[in-house]
Image (tube, rainbow, N blue to C red):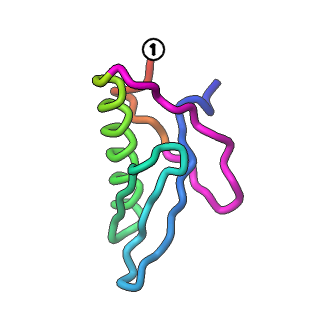
Amino acid sequence: MISRFVYPANFTRDSAGRTLVKFRDLPGAATGGASPSETMEEAIDCLGSYLAARLAEKAEVPAPSRPKTGQRLVPVPLWLAPN
């Protein structure tokens, strides 16, 4: 199922106009960007780095939850997604 390879995230603006991204399923995973495309690239990179670190530590990888209203879906990078 494709939903297993995307995580919901909150995208909000700060007072300086940057977009901040936080993943509710992944404590401590947060990033941001100056433009919409940069923000999504950073979010994908943050997600991949977080999941890769969990896998390297042989720690549990939280399953993605259903997105709530206003959240955007961030795809797991292809280099990390299982075949």
Give the residue displayed 37% in from the left and 69% down from the top: 35
Nearer-the-camera pick, 10 or 61: 61
Residue 10 is covered by the magenta coloring: no
Residue density around tag 1, few if under 14, some if 14–19, many if 20 or more, within 10 Å: few
The amino acid type of the residue labelled 1 equals Asn
**Of all residues shown, which one is farthest toward the bottom?**
15
> Quarter holding the N terminus?
top right
Q: Write down the region rendered in magenta.
A: 58-74
> Quarter holding the C terminus?
top left
The quadrant holding residue 3 is top right
**Relative image position of residue 25 (x, y in whole percent):** 54, 44
Magenta residues: mostly which secondary structure? Answer: loop
Give the residue displayed 35% in from the left and 52% down from the top: 41
Give above or below for 60 relative to 20.
above
- Residue for badge 1: 83
**Of all residues shown, which one is farthest toward the top?**
83
Query: In this image, 34 relative to 23: left or right?
Result: left
Give above or below for 17 relative to 36.
below
Give above or below for 5 relative to 30.
above
**Relative image position of residue 8 (x, y in whole percent):** 57, 48
Give above or below for 58 relative to 18.
above
Residue 59 is covered by the magenta coloring: yes
Nearer-the-camera pick, 35 or 30: 30
Query: In this image, 21 relative to 24: left or right?
Result: left
Question: Element under label 1?
Answer: loop
Give the residue displayed 30% in from the left and 24% down from the top: 57
**Relative image position of residue 53 (x, y in whole percent):** 30, 32
Give the residue displayed 48% in from the left and 40% down from the top: 75
